[in-house]
Amino acid sequence: MELLTPLDTICRLIIRAREMEAQVPAQDADEDPDNVDDFDDEGGEALSVLEDEVNTGVEEEIRALLDDLADDQLAEVLALAWVGRGTYDTSEWDDATQEASDNVEQGNDGAIDELMDMPMLAGLLDAGLAAFDLSCEGIGQID
């Protein structure tokens, strides 16, 4: 299988999806009063050292990246995610890309929303690439 979408574009999408998945909204200290690790030495303000506020910029960047893809490339990314999820096997690639193309023809927003709503999108795309013996190793920030 030869990709229509540049591998570095898919890898950039994987990197950003990992960033989005890693974000954890800070908890309100009043939500779990039994968790003493959330308080400073004086029992005051909650500490959020390991938590990061949700950065909507990452989600917007992913949406923009997907929106900039040509229809056939967006369909390919969706089909790769489906293969990574196990909805389709590599031997069913033509069927996956056809269904994804039909999905994209109904409107890019629907396909983009489906991708954005997939839990663990980065892992699904990575698994989809791996199913075709492709990898992001050595591309960008992925090693």
Image (spheres, grey):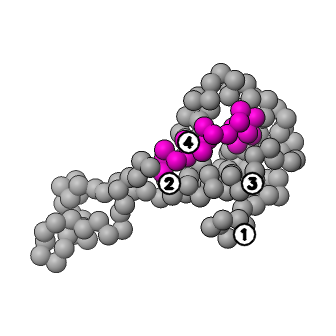
Mark in the foreground, 2 or 3: 3
Which portion, as a residue range, is magenta?
Answer: 58-79
**Looking at the image, which is closer to me, 142 or 25?**
142
Q: What residue does disc 4 label? A: 64
Q: Secondary structure at mark 3?
A: helix
Image position, residue 60 (x, y; %): 48, 44
Mark in the foreground, 2 or 4: 4
Task: Identify residue type, mark 4.
Answer: Ala
* Quarter that holds the C terminus: bottom right
Mark in the foreground, 4 or 3: 4
Give the mark nearer the N terminus: 2 vs 1. 2
Mark 2 surroundings within 10 Å by alpha-carbon count, few (fewer than 14), some (14 through 19), many (20 or more):
some
Q: Residue furthest top?
A: 106
**Looking at the image, which is closer to me, 74 or 30?**
74
Q: CA distance from mark 2 to mark 3?
A: 21 Å
Q: CA distance from mark 2 to mark 1?
A: 22 Å
Q: Secondary structure at mark 1?
A: loop
Asked whether residue 142 is in view, the answer is: yes
Q: What residue does disc 2 label? A: 21
Q: Residue furthest front?
A: 68
Q: What residue does disc 1 label? A: 138
Q: CA distance from mark 4 to mark 3?
A: 17 Å
